[in-house]
Amino acid sequence: MPTTAGIGVVFPPQDLSALLDLGRFLELHTGPALLLGPDGEQVPLPEEVYRVLVKVVEGLREGKVITVVPRTQRLTTQEAADFLGISRPTLVKLLEQGEIPYEQPGRHRRIMFSDLLAYQQRRREERRAALDRMTEDSSEAGLYATSPEDYTGALRNARKRAGRKADAS
């Protein structure tokens, strides 16, 4: 398994048959089982480990690459940018704007994985709120009830109302 600074990365196997069998087994058995060693020794599988196993198998069955990262893991700016799916310069701008906390013990910045998760969650909530506002504004402007031919006029009116709201504040 390739690792980068304590991060474990697992790619789906070429032959998915064993994974499909394991997936079916986990679907039929909804609780933790036992881990059986090659010498016959059995160890109960804790609930937390079982839930992770189910998620890993689901992801691999879907052809996804699985990454296991401790929440306290410190990442380089490149690793953090890769995780967020943005360029390194864009990440550095976010760090400098205070959007994501970081440490700089020497020349290089380090970002806590938990801080990346918190940033991702905030962005998700901001996008959801913006979509809710857009839906509400569109509904108030009557854009859902208009025909395609009337849409342009309704959109123009909605923009005028939005401009008046902005001027009033």
Image (cartoon, grey):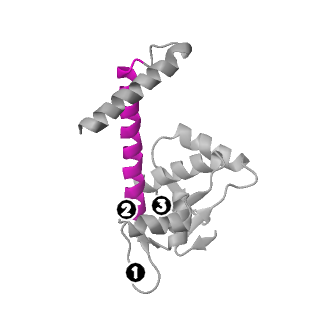
- The answer to which of 106 and 114 lies nearer the viewer is 106
Q: Is residue 37 left or right of residue 98?
A: right
At horizontal 37% and vertical 45% (from top left) the residue drawn is 126
Where does the image place residue 52, in percent across and percent down from the top left? 48, 53
Read off the magenta span.
Answer: 114-142
The mark lying in front, picked from 3 and 2, is 2
Where does the image place residue 124, in percent across and percent down from the top left? 41, 46
Where disc 1 sits, the SS reads: loop
Label 3 amino acid?
A: Val
- The answer to which of 137 and 57 lies nearer the viewer is 137
Q: Distance between the residues labelled 2 and 1?
A: 15 Å
Where disc 2 sits, the SS reads: loop
Q: Distance between the residues labelled 3 and 1?
A: 42 Å
The mark lying in front, picked from 3 and 1, is 1
Mark 3 packing: few (<14 Cα in 10 Å), some, or many (20+)? few
Q: How far apart are marks 3 and 2 (CA)?
A: 44 Å
Vertical position of residue 151 compared to residue 65: above or below: above
Label 2 amino acid?
A: Glu
- Mark 2, residue position: 99
At horizontal 58% and vertical 57% (from top left) the residue drawn is 66
Say if mark 2 contacts mark 1, CB within 8 Å. Answer: no
- The answer, for residue 21, to whether it is visible in the render is yes
Where does the image place residue 58, in percent across and percent down from the top left? 58, 46
Mark 2 packing: few (<14 Cα in 10 Å), some, or many (20+)? some
- Mark 3, residue position: 43
